[in-house]
Amino acid sequence: MQIKIGDKLVGNKSPILIVAEAGVNHNGNINMAKKLVDAAVEAGADAVKFQTFKAENLVTMSAEKASYQRERTGSERPQYDMLKKLELTAEEFVELAKYSRKREIIFLSSPFDENSVDLLDEIGVPAFKIPSGEITNFPLLEYVAKKGKPVILSTGMSTVEEVREALNVIKNNGSNDVILLHCVTSYPSKVKDMNLRVMETLKTAFALPIGLSDHTLGITIPTASVALGAVMLEKHFTLDKNFSGPDHKASLNPKELSEMVLAIRDVETALGNGIKKITQEEEEIKAVSRKSIVAKVDIAKGAIIQEDMLIIKRPASGLEPKFIGIIVGRKTTRNIRKDEPISWEALGGKS
């Protein structure tokens, strides 16, 4: 199954879609957001993704921060105040989408409410990304699905049954093009908790394209996911890990993002097509590293070949060692010098 997102096909026969997750690492500043787009382009990512929300529609005024948010932004103010500082206006999202198109990178954003869905739809996002926290928000899932665009569904903090319920809502409301992303929702996620084989479980259970939304530190885990069949990879990045804000420290910097993209493309190339064949470079090396049957002594014309007349040596310019049992007992048709590779011609031809 392949799903088109922008000008890219996503599926097992296509290159993995690499999404540089800018999220809220713009700190509410449109100029910083554009610099994040630039960094994603320079790193070679296929898409850049943000988050679209209004704090008053997302959290109550008294909602507490998650522990990682308290560590990075302080605990004296509620979650609302933190999120309010991370908003971009509707006009800024329009500008950001235009800028992304100008830079020739796919623009994506996760909506957290129906107004945000409408805004992103008007902007022309090619797909809707549903964050893990919204997987049981059926009204939002219904609203997104009715837009008729592909849906990318993160599955952090959920059970297989909850994923199934969410998919039923999405499909029953008109969207059949769904990509599932395995995700562990902690910032950063611990390697021991990643359980990447869940991607195989999801693929078996739902027969859908599967990818990874990764929150571990470094690039090892997202690179490994490619070997397990991920068709899409989402990874947070920032301009500087030392910036203030909830997500910077668990994000890649631009250099690391570039390294991840290169590593993923290398793994893709190395996976190949599964057809066992000898490469051109191997053909050259084979000639000098394989062995052939060689005369251990001078052998006269008309002699009957005995095993003690032979030795196996490099290079592979004579008969392969696997034929030694066949040529023992054969009569030579000419003199064979010591250390000369044995050929069928010296034995009267192959029979």
Image (cartoon, helix red, strand yellow):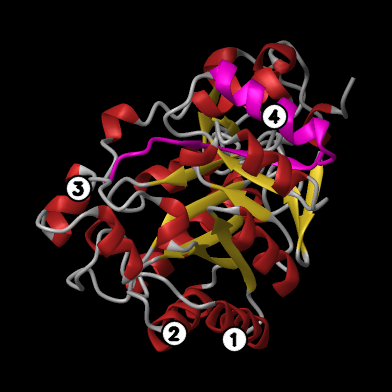
Distance, label 1 to label 2, CA atoms, is 9 Å
Other residues around mark 1 within 10 Å, as few (<14) / some (14–19) / many (≥20) = some
Asked if the residue at tag 2 contacts the one at tag 4, i.e. Cβ–Cβ closer than 8 Å, the answer is no
Is 307 placed above or below 231 here?
Answer: above
Q: What type is the residue that disc 3 sits on? A: Tyr
The local secondary structure at tag 4 comes to helix
Residue extending farthest to the front is 61
Asked if the residue at tag 3 contacts the one at tag 2, i.e. Cβ–Cβ closer than 8 Å, the answer is no
In x, y percent, where is residue 173? 81, 37
Distance, label 4 to label 2, CA atoms, is 34 Å
Residue 343 in view, yes or no: no
- At horizontal 72% and vertical 10% (from top left) the residue drawn is 329
Other residues around mark 3 within 10 Å, as few (<14) / some (14–19) / many (≥20) = some
Distance, label 4 to label 3, CA atoms, is 30 Å
**Disc assigned to residue 167:** 4
* Magenta-colored span: 160-187
Q: Which comes before the other along the chain, label 1 or label 4?
A: 1
Q: What type is the residue that disc 4 sits on? A: Leu
Distance, label 1 to label 4, CA atoms, is 32 Å
Q: Would you name the residue on which mark 3 appears? A: 68
Is 32 placed above or below 338 here?
Answer: below
Other residues around mark 4 within 10 Å, as few (<14) / some (14–19) / many (≥20) = many
Q: Assign the N terminus to one quadrant of the image.
A: top right
The local secondary structure at tag 2 comes to helix
Q: Which comes before the other along the chain, label 4 or label 3?
A: 3
Tell me if residue 29 is in the magenta stretch.
no
Q: What type is the residue that disc 2 sits on? A: Ile
